[in-house]
């Protein structure tokens, strides 16, 4: 399991290229990785723009241009991989966030989506 310094490093790296990137599609290869309804997950994220990635403990918190947030835990071996246009997606990707500029963010492991409302978290 990644320790806090590794999770902090992932957060810093994601913040170098992900903010201001708009999601135009979400491809889910492993539905069990999403907590909740996959069609709702996709609908909530398509058209959203990443604002910033934060961290609380070992959770990465993705904020967007709305009140939407996405939580991610890397678990034992979770990874985010940036794929540049013209390159193939990772064959191990469980979820792929397709970005407007042609890049893709591949995720391998566990995601959780929640919406921030009045300081609480609702699913």
Image (tube, rainbow, N blue to C red):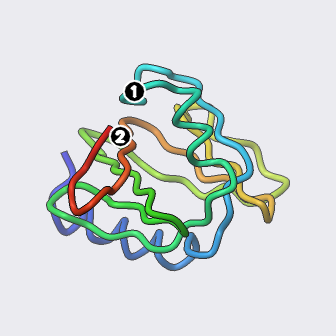
Under circle 2, the secondary element is: strand
Under circle 1, the secondary element is: loop
Report the residue at 71% width, 57% height from top. Answer: 99
Would you name the residue on which mark 2 appears?
112
Image side of residue 46 versus residue 64, left or right: right
Q: CA distance from mark 2 to mark 1?
A: 8 Å
Location of residue 122 with respect to 40 vertically, above or below: below
Report the residue at 65% width, 40% height from top. Answer: 26
Q: Residue furthest bottom?
A: 16
Residue 115 is marked as none
Mark 2 crowd level (few <14, some 14–19, many ≥20, 10 Å Cα): some
Residue 36 is marked as 1
Q: Residue furthest right?
A: 86
Q: Residue 50 appears at what percent x and percent y?
A: 55, 66
Image side of residue 85 versus residue 20, left or right: right
Report the residue at 62% width, 59% height from top. Answer: 48
Location of residue 21 with respect to 92 vertically, above or below: below
Residue 58 sits in quarter: bottom left
Mark 1 crowd level (few <14, some 14–19, many ≥20, 10 Å Cα): some
Q: Residue 38 appears at what percent x and percent y?
A: 52, 26
* Front in this rendered view, residue 54 or 8: 54
Task: Please identify the quadrant where the C terminus is shown.
Answer: top left
For the residues labelled 2 and 1, say whether their Cβ atoms are less than 8 Å apart: yes
Q: Residue 108 appears at what percent x and percent y?
A: 46, 38
Q: Residue 52 appears at what percent x and percent y?
A: 45, 73
Report the residue at 61% width, 65% height from top. Answer: 49
* Front in this rendered view, residue 13 or 96: 96
Of the image marks 2 and 1, the number of the one nearer the N terminus:
1
């Amino acid at each position: 399991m990644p320790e806090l310094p590794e999770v902090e490093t992932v957060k810093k790296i994601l913040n170098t290229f992900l903010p201001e990137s708009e999601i135009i599609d979400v491809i889910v290869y492993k539905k069990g990785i999403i907590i909740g309804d996959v069609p709702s997950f996709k609908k909530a994220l398509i058209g959203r723009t990443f604002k910033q990635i934060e961290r609380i403990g070992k959770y990465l918190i993705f904020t967007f241009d709305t009140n939407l947030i996405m939580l991610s835990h890397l678990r034992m071996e979770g990874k985010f991989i940036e794929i540049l246009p013209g390159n193939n997606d990772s064959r191990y990707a469980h979820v792929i966030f397709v970005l407007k500029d042609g890049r893709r963010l591949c995720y391998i492991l566990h995601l959780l989506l929640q919406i921030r409302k009045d300081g609480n978290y609702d699913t």
